[in-house]
Image (cartoon, grey):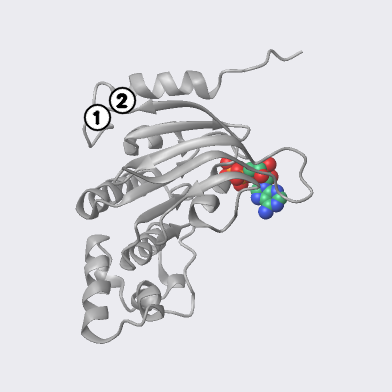
Amino acid sequence: MNLILFRNVSKTYERETSPAVDNVSFAVRDGEMACLIGPSGCGKSTMLKLIAGLESPDTGTVDRPKKVSVSFQFGALFPWLSVFENVALGLRTAGKSGTQLERTVNAELDAMRIRELSHKYPGELSGGQRQRVGIARALAVDPQVLLLDEPFSALDPETTAELHDDVIAAWKRTKKTIVLVSHVIEEAVSMGERVILMKAGKIEAEFPIQLPYPRRENDGFHRDVMKIRAEFFKKNHPSV
Ligand code: ADP
Ligand code: MG
């Protein structure tokens, strides 16, 4: 079953001449881990904003679930709230409190392995820790879809690899639909069941990745990376 469905969706921002998303038809099935990749400016974040309902299409239709959570590059935490309260925020907004709230928050903190940071403030955390808090917060409200916009791009390689494993574990545990945006081909092949390559507002190609997780040590990993790389850097129009 498709949880997200775009039909001929176009979106041009005000004062822009070319569309950020250009006649895109696209579906994500319930429970899928889909990864959108493409060069900077190709429309990836706009796709996520359309899924989140933060932007609406000029033409075409977007079917999307009501409960969508987004986690951005730097975790986007509130600096004046503790880690616990950052994760609790959405639940409080939804009217949850007491032991039920505490249990939910602690379960998410445990899942992202940051329970011991409960009382710290964002300013006291490393980039990787902040990202974990952002993901815990996004998952705490039990969304139907989790959107991750280049969540690992400011992190060192070891932290990135750890977070990849934790997000995969969270995905397997919760069976959430996840749409991950990245511009790193290796990351997309490590994470996605399907890698969707965008260029200039259009979907250029799709690659199902059939390798078992964890993937980096798998023999097929580099073959899939090379295949996508060839398309990623392919020039569609010969330059003059
Ligand atoms: P990506 O995430 O792949 O880097 P974006 O979706 O952010 O791409 O942007 C796609 C295009 O839309 C780019 O040309 C970008 O400059 C433009 N764009 C993005 N957001 C806005 C905005 N709020 N107003 C005007 N143009 C925008
Ligand atoms: Mg972006």
Left or right position of 215 against 93: left
- Name the mark nearer the viewer: 2 or 1: 2
Name which residue lies at 38% across and 63% down. 138
Q: Amino acid at mark 2?
A: Phe
Residue at left offset 49%, top offset 58% = 74
Q: Is residue 73 visible?
A: no
Q: How would you rate the neighbour count of disc 2 (Cα within 10 Å): few for under 14, some for 14-19, many for 20 or more?
A: some
Query: Height in image: 222 above or below 17?
Result: above
Question: Residue 224: which quarter of the image?
Answer: top left
Residue 27 x/y as whole percent: 42, 39
Quarter of the image where the N terminus is located: top left
- Residue 127 versus residue 227 in the image, above or below: below
Rounded to the nearest angstrom, the CA distance separating label 2 from label 1 is 7 Å
| Residue picked out by circle 2 | 221
Q: Position of residue 126 (x, y in %)?
A: 41, 62
Please give the name of the residue rendered at 48% of the width and 74% of the height, measured from the top-left corner: 78
| SS label for mark 1 | loop
Tag 2 near tag 1, CB within 8 Å: yes
Q: Position of residue 196 (x, y in %)?
A: 45, 32
Query: What residue would you read off at disc 1?
Result: 217
Residue at point 30%, 25% (across, down): 221
- Which of the two residues, 78 or 45, is positioned nearer the viewer here? 45
Query: Residue type at mark 1?
Result: Glu
Q: Nearer the viewer, residue 102 or 10?
A: 10
Residue 146 image offset from top left, x and y in percent: 38, 54
